[in-house]
């Protein structure tokens, strides 16, 4: 199936209040152009250099075709504090904030550049230790002290389930993030995004209240790392 057919198929299945974030990492700009042609506007990248190269490439392509730049970029990868200037000018949201050190660096960048940066806090729900993210206590600690970060807008939680065939494990991971999200969002109206679900598990994630699914492989095919 073509990229366009894949997108159409996924959109048809998604509830209307769940956003599709097309994960274009490791795929060429030609693939992003094709997805754009299918109506997709929200894309996510996980490497700073790649984002910083694709944003201007897509901008020039749209301008050359007389189109307005209405693409929205999300950043979903591990972000080192020395790479902020490659990401923060372009990304409308950083979904993958996974340390206090990073949060403090983003706050400083926002202060220096007169901007407020939207973020999701990454909650470590998977059993793999290798995955990034905060514990529940750390997330509550940060949010209870959110006044420390006037240049950060806390929009919600992001999580990645354990990579497994065992659906009960995936359900248990999503159930934990969903519970924490409900608890937090009930007292903070702006904390309204729950980013869970990838190609292999997005149907399950929707059952647990996902507001945005991050789908790469099912749209663009396998990645060549
Ligand atoms: C790569 C990636 C995805 C997309 O994964 P697919 O299985 O290709 O859909 C989603 N979220 C994050 C954080 C990723 O790094």
Image (cartoon, helix red, strand yellow):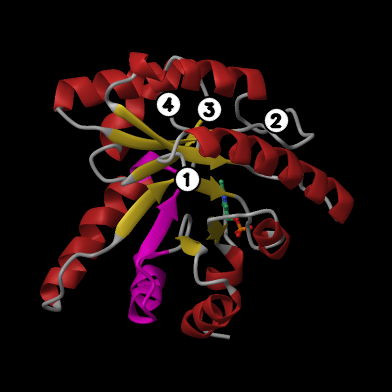
Query: From where the camera sits, is residue 201 visible?
Result: yes
* Residue at the image point whose x is 35% and y is 38% from the top: 118
Cα distance, mark 4 to mark 1? 26 Å
Q: Name the residue carrying label 3.
A: 98
Q: Name the residue carrying label 2.
A: 130
Which stretch did the figure color magenta? 28-49
Ranked by sequence position, the earlier of labels 2 and 4 is: 4
* Residue at the image point whose x is 40% and y is 19% from the top: 146
Eyeballing the image, is 138 above or below 18?
above
* Residue at the image point whose x is 25% and y is 64% from the top: 58
Q: Is mark 1 within 8 Å of ligand 1?
A: no
- The answer to whether the residue labelled 2 contacts the one labelled 4, judged by CB atoms less than 8 Å apart, is no
Residue nearest the viewer, comparing 196 with 63 = 196
Ranked by sequence position, the earlier of labels 2 and 3 is: 3
- The answer to whether the residue labelled 2 contacts the one labelled 1, judged by CB atoms less than 8 Å apart, is no
Q: Is mark 2 within 8 Å of ligand 1?
A: no
Q: Which numbered tag is attached to residue 152?
A: none
Q: Secondary structure under badge 1? A: loop
Ranked by sequence position, the earlier of labels 3 and 4 is: 4
Cα distance, mark 2 to mark 4? 16 Å
Q: Secondary structure under badge 2? A: loop
Residue 126, located in which quarter of the rendered image? top right
- The answer to whether the residue labelled 3 contacts the one labelled 4, judged by CB atoms less than 8 Å apart, is no
Residue pushed farthest front? Answer: 187
Residue 178 x %, y %: 67, 44
Q: Tell me if 176 is positioned left or right of 156 in this view.
A: right
Eyeballing the image, is 27 above or below 93?
below
Q: Which numbered tag is attached to residue 192?
A: 1
> How many marks overall?
4
Eyeballing the image, is 146 above or below 74?
above
Q: Which numbered tag is attached to residue 80?
A: 4
Closer to us: mark 3 or mark 4?
Answer: 3
């Amino acid at each position: 199936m073509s990229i366009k057919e894949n997108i159409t198929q996924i959109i048809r299945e998604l509830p209307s209040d769940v956003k599709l974030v097309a994960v274009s990492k490791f795929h060429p700009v030609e693939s992003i152009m094709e997805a754009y042609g299918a109506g997709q506007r929200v894309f996510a990248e996980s490497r700073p250099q790649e984002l910083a190269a694709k944003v201007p490439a897509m901008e020039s392509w749209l301008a050359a075709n007389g189109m307005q730049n209405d693409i929205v970029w999300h950043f979903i990868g591990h972000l080192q504090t020395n790479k902020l200037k490659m990401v923060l000018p372009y990304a409308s949201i950083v979904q993958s904030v996974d340390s206090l050190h990073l949060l403090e660096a983003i706050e400083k960048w926002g202060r220096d550049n007169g901007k407020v940066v939207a973020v999701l806090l990454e909650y470590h729900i998977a059993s793999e230790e290798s995955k990034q993210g905060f514990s529940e206590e750390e997330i509550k600690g940060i949010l209870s002290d959110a006044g420390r970060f006037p240049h950060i807008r806390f929009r919600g939680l992001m999580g990645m389930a354990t990579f497994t065939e065992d659906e009960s494990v995936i359900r248990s991971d999503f159930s934990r993030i969903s519970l924490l999200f409900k608890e937090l969002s009930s007292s903070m109206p702006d904390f309204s995004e729950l980013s869970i679900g990838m190609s292999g598990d997005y149907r399950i994630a929707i059952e647990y209240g996902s507001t945005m699914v991050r789908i790469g492989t099912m749209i663009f095919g396998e990645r060549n790392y």
